[in-house]
Image: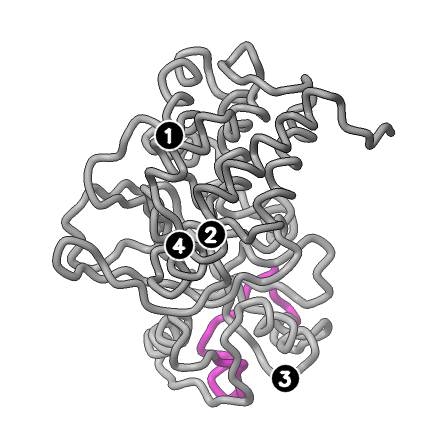
Amino acid sequence: MDFDLTADQKLFRATTREFLEKEMPLTRVRELASSGIGFESDWWRRGSELGWNAMTVDPAAGGDSISGEGLVDTCIVAEEMGRLVSPGPLAPTNVVAEALGRRGTAEQRSRYLPGLIDGTTVAAWCLGTDAAGFDPGGEVTATRSGPGFVLEGVTGPVEAAGQADIAIGPPPEDWEGPVRHIGTEEFVIITQPGDPAAQGQTGRVHLSDLASRQWVHYTPESGLAHFLDEACAAAGFRPRIAVRTELGMSAANYAAAGLGPALVPAEIIPPHFPGLLLLPEPPVRRPLTAYTRTGPDPIAAAFIDILASEAPITPAHIRRRLGLHRTA
């Protein structure tokens, strides 16, 4: 592989560096970090005029790159932004734009991509376990507060979350903006292999049969703590606690190691997970929704459409392992 930059790429690097040093010096980065703003929308749009968000998009869908190697050109921008610790949703915006350019319909591409490419629309993501290689952890809930909302709970870092146009999660209480149902989240019981709770069962266990067990519970700050308490209360008992953790995947690992059963969202369990997965009886589920402050702009609406129609909320490897038909 040739790692030498072409003359055009060297010019692009120099132009990007000059722009960053002038428009986003370290002094301004520190000010933004202290203020909690993260990055300024006007600045991001000016950077987008240099083509930052178009380079991974298929040219047939409106994309463009310096060298024809969009990923390499995007890495040039990433390297220069990293050199000055420059803020901005470069990675999530390019991933979303590339996905729409590659998988969206012609009508979706022509109608929705411009907002991402010109920087008027911001993309943010909350990484899942399989994609990130780690447990994002916990749960976040949104509560209406004046013109905006307050996020509560525990999760991993979400880049550009403060500027995002859409949030995904359980239906928020007292939400006045648009809310769209996108699917149903399935919860499973994790125990160690060979657990007697599974004997004579076909991948299912009554929660009441686990009333005498000590459970892997969640810290009070985690939204999953209240969820587990409610599920056990519906089955007629209060869970005894063996250990607490903030993270769903940590709870699954503790349970697989024999510390006690854990109730976790099915989608966080990776393929080849060594623990025993059981469906609780009665089923434990919750709806997942997409919600926005106001009516979603075209790109957000397109993303919600794709998410609702194509996203496997319960992954295929989990459905196969539990013998489920695809219902979510």
Residue 258 circle label = none
* Between discs 2 and 4, the one toward the N terminus: 4
Is 171 left, or right, of 96 in this rendering? left
Residue 125 visible at all:
yes
Could you tell me the amino acid type at mark 4?
Gly
Q: Mark 2 points at which residue?
A: 159
Is 325 left, or right, of 140 in this rendering? right
Could you tell me the amino acid type at mark 3?
Leu
Which is more foreground, mark 2 or mark 3?
A: 2
* Between discs 1 and 2, the one toward the N terminus: 2
Could you tell me the amino acid type at mark 2?
Glu
Distance from the alpha carbon under mark 4 to that under mark 1: 28 Å
Could you tell me the amino acid type at mark 1?
Asp
Q: Name the residue under label 1.
A: 305
Looking at this view, is 174 or 279 the one in front? 174
> Label 3: few (<14), some or many (≥20) within 10 Å?
many
Distance from the alpha carbon under mark 2 to that under mark 3: 34 Å
* Between discs 4 and 3, the one toward the N terminus: 4
Q: Which percent across, then down, holds residue 245?
A: 52, 79
Residue 259 circle label = 3
Distance from the alpha carbon under mark 1 to that under mark 3: 41 Å
Is 275 left, or right, of 176 in this rendering? right
> Label 2: few (<14), some or many (≥20) within 10 Å?
many
Q: Give the range drawn in magenta.
A: 199-217
Residue 186 visible at all:
no
